[in-house]
Amino acid sequence: FTAQPRRYHGDLLIKRDRDKITLVNEVDLERYLKGVAGKEMSPSSHPEALKAQIIAARTYAMYEVRAQTLRRVKGEKFDLYDDERSQVYGGMERETEAISSLVDETAGMFVVWQDRIFKTFYSSTCGGYTEPAWIVLGDVDKIPPLAGVKCDYCIGSKYYEWKESFTKTEMARKLFPD
């Protein structure tokens, strides 16, 4: 198995602390979104759905950059993780002409509530109903766009419904690892 090298737009910054090195891809917002859209949603999805995803991703990223949550709270040297903790970012890995065009077409568009952007949470599968963000995360504003709603859009997902069984011993091991 040989890993394919990943290509990125922007600059690679090497940040060094006493005991660790952090590589940071410094990239402008629109190029960043070209690396997010095809990872967060299938590039073959309907263009209007992809546009909605791009606008939600742009809003989330801008909110995090402005709030500097990772820098202030976690002491990180960057604004967004490249995985599910923020948004999945793959550099140029899944960037296509169509994705690039959609990002360009939606440039400058954000989701706003009462004239301000907010942290636009989203997930791949909700299981039929989304919980209000403040119940799950506790520290977010109680605004209508973050309230729970019934949803049938992800009914075809393999994660929509699932079951898992554990013995008491297995559950104890998972909850209280050594």
Image (cartoon, grey):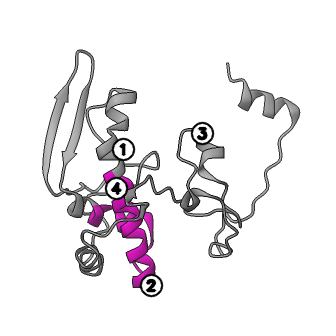
Q: Residue at x 43, y 54 (%)?
A: 118
Is residue 123 among the parts visible in the rendering?
no
Marks 4 and 1: in contact by CB < 8 Å? no
List the single residue furthest toward the right: 168
**Does the stretch in magenta take in 90?**
no
Q: Residue at x 79, y 51 (%)?
A: 164
Query: Which residue occupies the foreground of this view, 67 or 36?
Result: 67
Q: CA distance from mark 1 to mark 2?
A: 27 Å
Indicate which disc, 3 or 4, sits on the residue closer to the N terminus: 4
- Amino acid on which the number 2 mark rests in the picture: His
Label 1 crowd bin: few (<14), some (14–19), many (20+), radius 10 Å:
some
Marks 1 and 3: in contact by CB < 8 Å? no
Quarter holding residue 160? bottom right
Indicate which disc, 3 or 1, sits on the residue closer to the N terminus: 1
Query: Which residue occupies the foreground of this view, 98 or 2?
Result: 98
Residue 95 position (above or below residue 76)? below
Q: Position of residue 153 (x, y in %)?
A: 62, 76
Q: Which residue is mark 2?
A: 46
Quick one: SS at disc 3? loop
What number is the disc on residue 138? Answer: 3
Range drawn in magenta: 33-62
Indicate which disc, 3 or 2, sits on the residue closer to the N terminus: 2
What number is the disc on residue 89? Answer: 4
Query: Which residue occupies the foreground of this view, 171 or 128?
Result: 128
What number is the disc on residue 81? Answer: 1
Residue 52 position (above or below residue 16)? below
Please tell me whether the stretch drawn in magenta is mainly helix, strand or loop. Answer: helix
Q: CA distance from mark 4 to mark 2?
A: 20 Å
- Amino acid on which the number 4 mark rests in the picture: Tyr
Marks 2 and 3: in contact by CB < 8 Å? no
